[in-house]
């Protein structure tokens, strides 16, 4: 199998960069459909509109409904055609961004991504996750190309809730370990090939930056200040993790995250929080060295990532529900097989409980 890699055409990051959005897109078109929440547009719309106006271009705001459904994608496509826009901009969190990516893919238009939080690694990828009206994942659209521009204003990230940054670090924390598992097993990645050495290098750098700067970055957000530590962690969580997961591959951590959709008690958790716990499950299955497990647990404890089922919101542990989580993580279409084709639902079930035991013991140590 060939190696393959995907990445955004251009990545821009820095404090105050939102005002340069128009400058970075001036050759893409003249009318830009900006998909964002009403609140997001209220907070940032004036800056966005001014940045396009400075280039004699027009920003057309289209309110995001709040859920990345097929119906919402088609609605935004209709707005884009009615307004004669040549570029689609997704601004906000993951679901608004995924809606923009899917709409741009269907219309064959350039796509620009402006994340206003660093809660996950979706912005740089060519993956758009779609949901049903109940918020359950129904499809992951693998687009032909990644975003033409990802622009990250770290001033916005510094003023977003700290828990969102922590969730993003949780998502990014698994990148190296999942890529490592895929490289070892020879699994095919979302880039439709085996992992490149470049993607592996990026995945490892992602982990190293988190370990070194994660705690300081969290303090930066608590202080609403875009510091050098925050810049490094945002790059790790958005760029390095985004390229790392798509071109390095996914394994148990993300499969367990998906499985937790079947446990109602943890529906209040963010994607990255569940991925982080899924990483502990993966490390248990891998029989990771004690020193490696300790380093991961130390980081998770320092930034406040969930290390136990209770921290995931599961106050009453139900064996049947946990087994459903494990079964969902092991269906043929899931990425658990990228660690090993021999892993069973019973193995994952036992590892979920063992991760809880290890996490509980570490917290109480």
Image (tube, rainbow, N blue to C red):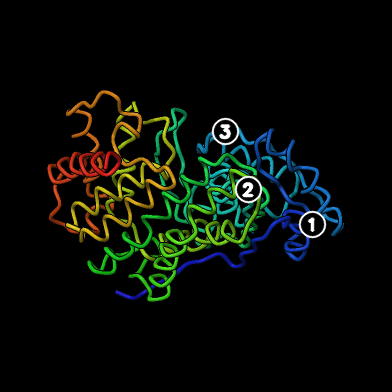
Comes first in the chain, label 3 or label 1: 1
Q: Secondary structure at mark 2?
A: helix
Q: Quadrant of residue 44?
A: top right
**117 vs 112, nearest the viewer:** 117
Crowding at dot 1, Cα within 10 Å, few <14 / some 14-19 / many 20+, comes out as some
**152 vs 234, nearest the viewer:** 234
On the rendered structure, is 128 left or right of 137? right
Residue drawn at x 46%, y 62% is: 212
**Which residue in the protein does label 2 denote?**
158
Q: In which quadrant of the rendered image does the N terminus lie?
A: bottom left
Q: Give residue 343's mark.
A: none
Q: Give residue 66's mark.
A: 3
Q: Secondary structure at mark 3?
A: loop
Vertical position of residue 37 compared to residue 256: above or below? above
Crowding at dot 3, Cα within 10 Å, few <14 / some 14-19 / many 20+, comes out as some
Residue drawn at x 46%, y 44% is: 167
Residue drawn at x 28%, y 34% is: 309
Distance from label 3 to label 2 (Cα)? 23 Å
Comes first in the chain, label 3 or label 2: 3
**Which residue in the protein does label 1 denote?**
30
């Amino acid at each position: 199998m060939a190696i393959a890699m995907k990445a955004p055409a251009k990545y821009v990051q820095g404090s105050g960069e939102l005002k340069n959005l128009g400058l970075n897109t001036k050759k893409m078109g003249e009318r830009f459909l900006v998909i964002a929440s009403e609140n997001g547009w209220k907070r940032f719309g004036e800056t966005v509109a001014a940045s396009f106006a400075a280039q004699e271009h027009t920003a057309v705001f289209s309110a995001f409904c709040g859920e990345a459904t097929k119906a919402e994608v088609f609605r935004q496509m209709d707005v884009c055609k009615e307004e004669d826009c040549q570029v689609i901009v997704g601004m906000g969190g993951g679901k608004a961004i995924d809606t923009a990516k899917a709409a741009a893919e269907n219309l064959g238009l350039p796509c620009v991504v402006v994340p206003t939080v660093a809660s996950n690694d979706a912005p740089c990828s060519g993956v758009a996750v779609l949901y049903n009206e109940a918020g359950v994942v129904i499809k992951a659209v693998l687009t032909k190309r990644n975003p033409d521009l990802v622009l990250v204003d770290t001033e916005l990230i510094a003023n977003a809730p700290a828990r969102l940054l922590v969730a993003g670090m949780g998502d990014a924390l698994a990148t190296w370990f999942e890529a490592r598992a895929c490289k070892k097993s020879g699994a095919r990645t979302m880039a439709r090939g085996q992992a490149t050495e470049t993607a592996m290098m990026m995945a490892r750098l992602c982990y190293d930056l988190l370990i070194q700067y994660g705690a300081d970055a969290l303090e930066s957000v608590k202080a609403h200040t875009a510091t050098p530590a925050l810049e490094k962690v945002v790059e790790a969580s958005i760029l390095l993790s985004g390229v790392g997961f798509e071109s390095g591959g996914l394994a148990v951590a993300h499969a367990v995250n998906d499985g937790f959709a079947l446990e109602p008690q943890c529906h209040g958790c963010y994607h990255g929080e569940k991925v982080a716990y899924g990483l502990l499950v993966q490390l248990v299955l891998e029989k990771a060295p004690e020193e490696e497990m300790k380093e991961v647990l130390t980081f998770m404890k320092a930034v406040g990532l969930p290390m136990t089922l209770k921290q995931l919101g599961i106050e009453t542990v139900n064996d049947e529900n946990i087994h459903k989580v494990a079964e969902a993580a092991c269906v043929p279409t899931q990425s658990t097989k990228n660690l090993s084709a021999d892993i069973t639902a019973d193995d994952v079930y036992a590892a979920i409980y063992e991760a809880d035991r290890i996490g509980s013991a570490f917290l109480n140590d």
